[in-house]
Amino acid sequence: MEIRDEKLLKLDSILKDLNSMVVAFSGGVDSTFLLHRAQIIRKSGVIAVTIRTPYIPSREIDEAIEFTNSFDIKHKVIDIAFPEMIRGNPIDRCYLCKKAIFTDLLSFAKENDYQFVIDGTNADDTGDFRPGIAALKELGIRIPLLEAGLTKKNIRELSRKADLESWDKPAMACLLTRIPYDTEVSDGMLRLVEEAENMLFELGYPGTRVRLHGDLARIECMPGYIEKIIHNPDKEHIISNLKKIGFRYVSLDLEGYRTGSSNPEKRAK
């Protein structure tokens, strides 16, 4: 038996012990796999809850709804206003956001007689700047993928084996990660970034980030896309569209997309 499969057995054991649960469902690779597995193990004792806020891409919400509908999984979308305590995009915004959102999820679970709230953080997430994990632990949120030692690679492999279309889905973080820390965030800034990334997605550049620096758009794209953008006629179309959206300057980050590129320790290097 492969180590990956041993971890899957451990995950199943954890889920069996949880009885009824609310799965915090973003629609990403990790939470999709966790929800799918929880549904197999617990069936009627599972409900997916997706949080909709101004800084979550609407495409993610739509995909979450589509997935739960296709697998006939109980699902609820809860709208939450932009928490004013993170309007200034502080360095601990992830901690503050998770604390607010998961407090609401715990209330939902209690009101609807679910015993646990679970999150899709994986074993790789502990190696990056993730203050949100501290908030989850403080609130008593269970983190089954992390507890089972499942890495992102494991989860993609298992998702592919389970015929989940999300297995090769690019990572997607909230739109606040596109804006520098300690910057006052407006809804207009978030829509600017979302529109820019949707345009690039539709042109065939999934997973591309558009980082906002005043009126400059800094494009971080996946490996192989830099050459494509530079030499493709799409370049002029991309520049023209980004300027129509509202950017004055357009730059292509030659380092490409990398997780946590705005994190404090990475900015200092």
Image (tube, rainbow, N blue to C red):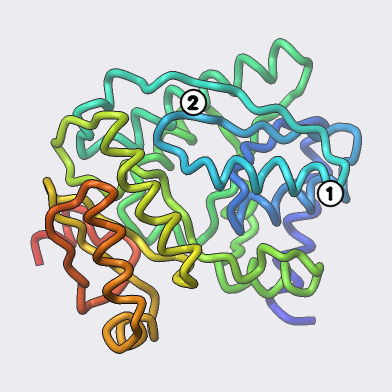
Q: Is residue 262 above or below residue 232?
A: above
Residue hosting label 2: 101
Please give the name of the residue rendered at 41% of the width and 64% of the height, measured from the top-left corner: 200
Measured Cα–Cα span from mark 1 to mark 2: 26 Å
Disc 1 on helix, strand or loop? helix
Callout 2 environment at 10 Å: few (<14), some (14 to 19), or many (20+)? some
Going by the image, does 184 lie left or right of 135? Answer: left
Estimate the x, y position of residue 139 in percent, counting from the top left. Answer: 50, 26
Going by the image, does 10 lie left or right of 42? Answer: left
Please give the name of the residue rendered at 47% of the width and 55% of the height, measured from the top-left corner: 172
Q: In the displayed image of the protein, which residue is found farthest to the right?
A: 44
Please give the name of the residue rendered at 13% of the width and 59% of the height, measured from the top-left corner: 249
Disc 2 on helix, strand or loop? helix
Residue type, mark 1 in image: Ser
Q: How many marks?
A: 2
Estimate the x, y position of residue 223 in percent, counting from the top left. Answer: 38, 82
Residue hosting label 1: 70
Residue type, mark 2 in image: Ile
Please give the name of the residue rendered at 36% of the width and 85% of the height, measured from the top-left corner: 228
Relative depth, front residue between 221 and 15: 221
In the picture, the quarter occupied by the N terminus is bottom right
Going by the image, does 49 lie left or right of 74? Answer: left
Callout 1 environment at 10 Å: few (<14), some (14 to 19), or many (20+)? few
Going by the image, does 194 lie left or right of 184? Answer: right
Marked residue nearer the N-terminal end (1 or 2): 1
Q: Is residue 42 above or below residue 244?
A: above
